[in-house]
Amino acid sequence: MDEQKQPGSAQNTNRWSLVAVIALVVVVLAVRTAWKGDSPTTETAQKLIWVQVLHGDGSIRDFDLNTDQETLGPALVEGGVVEDNQDGCGLSIRTADGETADGSRQEWWRITKNGELVSTGADAVLIADGDRFELAFQVGYGRS
């Protein structure tokens, strides 16, 4: 006699377990793919970035940098835009295009990337071909 499948039988339980495992694998792969697509990547290939330095006197100087660096700090040093002033946290931009900010007078360099304020040090800013940066001389730590 053919045995009819009863709800809750071992065969049905195994089938549902298999379906659940397959569904879980599909969800994990979809999330992983979406996460990889949204995560920032660096390009080790040659890239062109533009840097504009806005001086304290209002003058502006533009730099076109061809670089294979992955982050902004080394690209700025390599391109001669800033001096290589390393501190315990990495590059500290004190001098840009020959103008030195005096910390005792609350002078500093603000960095923007593609029009957005950068909230990390230059060494942590990933760069990609076509990025535009601005280094703007600032006075007063309460401003940005």
Image (cartoon, rainbow, N blue to C red):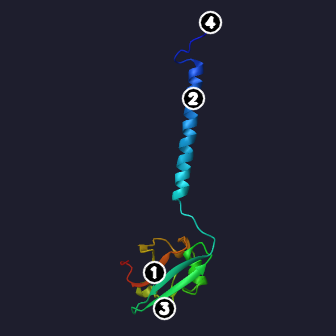
Tell me where residue 102 appears, x and y as whole percent. Answer: 46, 88
Q: At label 4, which amino acid type do we have?
A: Met
Q: Which residue is tagged 2?
A: 17
**Amino acid type at image mark 2:** Ser
Q: Quadrant of residue 65?
A: bottom right
Q: Position of residue 64 (x, y in %)?
A: 54, 84
Q: Earlier in the sequence, mark 4 or mark 3?
A: 4
Give the mark nearest the N terminus, 2 or 1.
Answer: 2
**Which of the 4 image quadrants contains residue 48?**
bottom right
Q: Nearer the viewer, residue 109 or 133?
A: 133
Q: Residue at x 53, y 57 (%)?
A: 37
Examine the image and state in which quarter residue 110 appears: bottom left
Quadrant that contains the N terminus: top right
- Image position of 143 with respect to 34: above or below: below
Q: Residues under labels 2 and 1: Cα distance?
A: 56 Å
Q: Which residue is mark 4?
A: 1
Q: Is residue 11 above or below residue 127?
A: above
Residue 3 visible within the image:
yes
Left or right of 110: which side holds 23?
right
Indicate which disc, 4 or 2, sits on the residue closer to the N terminus: 4
Q: Residues within 10 Å of mark 2 (few under 14, many from 20)?
A: few
Q: Secondary structure at mark 2?
A: helix
> In front of the other: label 4 or label 1?
4
Q: CA distance from mark 4 to mark 3?
A: 94 Å
Taking the spot 55% from the left edge, 51% from the top edge, the residue there is 33
Quadrant of image for the C terminus? bottom left
